[in-house]
Image: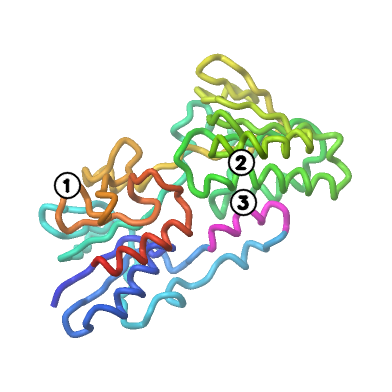
């Protein structure tokens, strides 16, 4: 019996185990997927929670609901991958052996990587994110009490999950404030490390007027060095003051990837772009947001890559 072990039951991990369960012999392959809890979050919905379009409870389902019964589902925190020994160690001491390993634990926002972002008790009080369930819920509460001042939407650096989402957020905020008849009392600012509002230069050139039409101020090429009180400070010492900051912190892969010696400086696993196979180990793959390929970190990209991976595997 050969053992396929998948770490992460998000978009990529769920698709991998379901597709391969159909393609691999049940008598010859044991398929196991590991995740921390049974709570599966519909991450695209986070964008809409702050504006009341979705209630938080609508975004949560049981992971078991999406994973085939013939796939073993293990709940636990991954401590590290012992790749030389072909096993995964969980935080509670359990050891999971494998013949093939798929890392699909994605990326997560890391506000701790920007000096000052977590200082002074501002996190989730004046500085918010919407890329996490708790962050989106907290931001919804903050927006309900915000009807004047400077609202800054800010990206720390690339790559990040769903690169267009911050721009979508600022447009949704503009529309939401207009519906509440408070747009004229709020200054909207969009700060990005890119040279334009959109991720592609042609799109920025042709669609940049969408921000001008809505009186959304653009701060391009803004590489934040620190948060100083209620001010963003860039490496070239530009300053952007804010009353409410909606930030997209640096996105990094899981910490166990670093502890296992499998990742780069962002805890992303270097892989071959044709096979998604780790460049360091012959039986370790990384899919979805967890690898270092220069593609958008988005559910659609995970979907298409899993289609190709399943056939190759």
Question: Which quadrant is the N terminus positioned in?
Answer: bottom left
Residue at numbered disc 3: 136
Q: Position of residue 87 (x, y in %)?
A: 17, 60
Magenta stretch contains residue 43:
yes
Do the numbered discs 2 and 1 sit on residues whose CB atoms are within 8 Å?
no
Q: CA distance from mark 3 to mark 1?
A: 37 Å
Q: Position of residue 194 (x, y in %)?
A: 54, 31
Q: CA distance from mark 2 to mark 1?
A: 37 Å
Region of the chain picked out in magenta, as a range: 42-52
Q: Is the residue 138 above or below the residue 235 in the image?
A: below
Residue at numbered disc 1: 280
Name the residue located 30 percent from the left edge and 78 percent from the top edge.
21
Q: Nearer the viewer, mark 3 or mark 1?
A: 1
Q: Dot 2 surroundings within 10 Å: few (below 14), some, or many (20 or more)?
A: many
Q: Is the residue 136 above or below the residue 222 in the image?
A: below
Name the main secondary structure of what is drawn in magenta.
helix
In this rendered view, identify the residue nearer to me: 313 or 125: 313
Counting residues from the start of the chain, the first of labels 3 and 1 encountered is 3
Colour option used: rainbow
Q: Position of residue 303 (x, y in %)?
A: 43, 63
Question: Which quadrant is the C terminus positioned in?
Answer: bottom left
The total of numbered circles placed on residues is 3
The circle drawn on residue 128 is 2
Counting residues from the start of the chain, the first of labels 2 and 3 encountered is 2
Q: Is residue 244 left or right of residue 3?
A: right
What secondary structure is marked by label 2?
A: strand
What secondary structure is marked by label 3?
A: helix
Counting residues from the start of the chain, the first of labels 2 and 1 encountered is 2
């Amino acid at each position: 019996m050969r053992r396929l072990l998948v770490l992460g039951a998000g978009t990529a991990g769920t698709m991998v185990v379901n597709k391969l369960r159909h393609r691999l012999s049940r008598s010859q392959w044991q398929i196991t997927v590991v995740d921390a809890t049974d709570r599966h979050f519909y991450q695209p919905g986070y964008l809409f929670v702050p504006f009341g379009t979705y209630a938080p409870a609508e975004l949560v389902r049981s992971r078991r609901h999406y994973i085939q019964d013939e796939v073993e589902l293990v709940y636990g925190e991954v401590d590290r991958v012992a790749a030389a020994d072909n096993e995964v160690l969980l935080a509670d001491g359990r050891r999971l052996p494998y013949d093939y390993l798929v890392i699909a634990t994605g990326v997560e926002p890391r506000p701790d990587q920007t000096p000052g972002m977590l200082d002074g008790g501002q996190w989730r009080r004046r500085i918010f994110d919407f890329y996490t369930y708790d962050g989106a819920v907290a931001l919804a509460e903050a927006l309900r009490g915000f009807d004047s001042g400077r609202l800054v939407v800010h990206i720390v650096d690339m790559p990040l999950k769903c690169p267009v989402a911050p721009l979508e957020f600022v447009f949704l905020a503009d529309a939401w404030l207009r519906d509440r008849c408070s747009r004229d009392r709020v200054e909207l600012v969009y700060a990005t490390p890119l040279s334009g509002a959109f991720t592609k230069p042609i799109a920025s050139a042709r669609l940049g007027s969408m921000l001008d039409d809505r009186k959304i101020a653009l701060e391009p090429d803004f590489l934040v060095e620190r948060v100083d009180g209620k001010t963003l400070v860039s490496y070239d010492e530009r300053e952007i003051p804010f009353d409410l900051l909606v930030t997209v912190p640096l996105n990094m892969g899981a910490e166990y990837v670093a502890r296992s010696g499998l990742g780069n400086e962002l805890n992303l696993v270097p892989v071959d772009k044709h096979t998604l196979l780790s460049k360091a180990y012959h039986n370790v793959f990384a899919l979805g947001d967890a690898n270092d390929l220069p593609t958008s970190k988005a559910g659609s990209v995970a979907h298409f890559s899993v289609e190709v991976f399943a056939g190759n595997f």
